[in-house]
Amino acid sequence: MRRLTWPQVLAWRMRRQFLLEPEEHGDPVAVVRRLAGVQAQVSSAAAAALAARGAATPGEVGARGVIEPGLVRTWAMRGTLHLLPREEAPAYLALCATVRNWEKPSWTKAFGATPADLETIAAAAREVLDGAVLTREELTAAVLERTGSEHLRQALGSGWGTLLKPLAWWGVLCHGPSRGGKVTFTSPGFGGLPPVEEAARVVLRAYLGAHGPATPLMFDNWLMRKTSRKADVKRWFAALEDELTKVEVEGEEMHALTCELDGLLESAPSPAVRLLGPFDQYVLGAGTDASFLIPPDRRAEVSRAAGWIAPVVLHGGRVAGTWDPATGETSLWEEVPADPLRQERERWKELL
């Protein structure tokens, strides 16, 4: 079994994620594809993630509402909004939908909708969103008109879109361009989702291609916060078995893409210093509980109240502190070379 160190893997991850050599005026779709999606719960954070990798400036992306013809913005991994490459989005959604949390009695009790209610809402939403872009209020009114399910009015109007997430995972709807500051929805026009095993191959290949060696638990933590059935995750890895090689990373057995093995083995630790915006995929892909990335006693400084993931300072691929993009001030818990840090601050001034 081939052996790797975390400094090797982290240097490889930075390079794969366009952090060592940001592309000049790169393609946002290509960057989102390489990162296996970009979290877009906060639009400005998604813009910053693209800008940090040379795909656009936050102002440019923000003016487009972080929507590109080749991208779709929808609820995906961990039930949060993401930018996904349109061609591969159905695979991500098919895998997210396997949690089937809406079938649990506790879910029905909490949100007042049965699985049958959701099927009815989905059928109505498919009809009303075909060729249309509707605000939440317009979508709610149209669905209620067709279903007559008045008891669902409050749930459908929820700011968190609880009932809409399963519809997103089924490929019924996605976010459209903002209208007067209001969220809109439209049909993604996928024409169906792929079989789960086929979807698993697409998503696992993308995840391991962005984040490097991982265990099934690490993958599920990124996908659905460890709520997928273990047997399902095991089967997904088996579906890609012909493209995987087992490696050992500092004593832990993991799976790596065979096609990336040489690059991983040849990767040398990087002393690079980089600043990342909030909710960056480099952090989310590993999870804030990854001790190889964030010291456990510093996790609360990165993963904050209300689910906020702070902007971070990277040194050698590890999180060495946090920073404030508005002021450039840093809060470091490890020594970071001053000149590269200053250069990164200057780069972000230009980006912002």
Image (spheres, grey):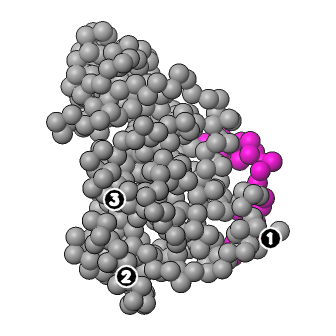
Q: From mark 3 to mark 1, how far is it between C-alphas?
A: 40 Å
Q: Which residue is drawn at 31% across and 57% down?
A: 58
**Outermost residue toward the front in this view:** 25
Secondary structure beneath dot 3 equals loop
Contact (Cβ within 8 Å) of mark 3 with mark 1: no
- In the rendered structure, which disc, 2 or 1, sits on the residue that comes first in sequence? 1
**Horizontally, is 63 left or right of 236 in the view?**
left
**Residue 38 on the magenta segment:** no
Q: Which is more foreground, mark 2 or mark 1?
A: 2
Which residue of the protein is positioned furthest toward the right in this rendering? 1
> Is disc 3 surrounded by few (<14), some (14 to 19) or many (20+) residues within 10 Å?
many
Which residue is disc 3 drawn over? Answer: 57
Q: Percent x, y for residue 193? A: 57, 27
Residue 249 place in picture, x, y as percent? 69, 72
Which three-letter amino acid code belongs to the residue tagged 1? Arg
Write down the residue under mark 1: 2
From the viewer's perspective, is the residue at label 3 or at label 1 nearer?
3
Q: What stretch is highlighted in magenta?
A: 229-255
Q: Residue at x 35, y 68 (%)?
A: 311
Query: Compared to 102, does 39 lie above or below?
Result: below
Q: Quadrant of residue 115?
A: top left
For label 1, the SS is strand
The circle drawn on residue 343 is: 2
Point out residue 320 in the picture as x, y percentages from the top left corner: 43, 80
Q: Check residue 249 for magenta coloring.
A: yes
- Residue visible at 30% across and 53% down in the picture: 60
Please give the label number shown on residue 303: none
Q: Distance between the residues labelled 2 and 3?
A: 17 Å
Identify the element where label 2 is drawn.
helix
Q: Which residue is drawn at 66% across and 62% down?
A: 213
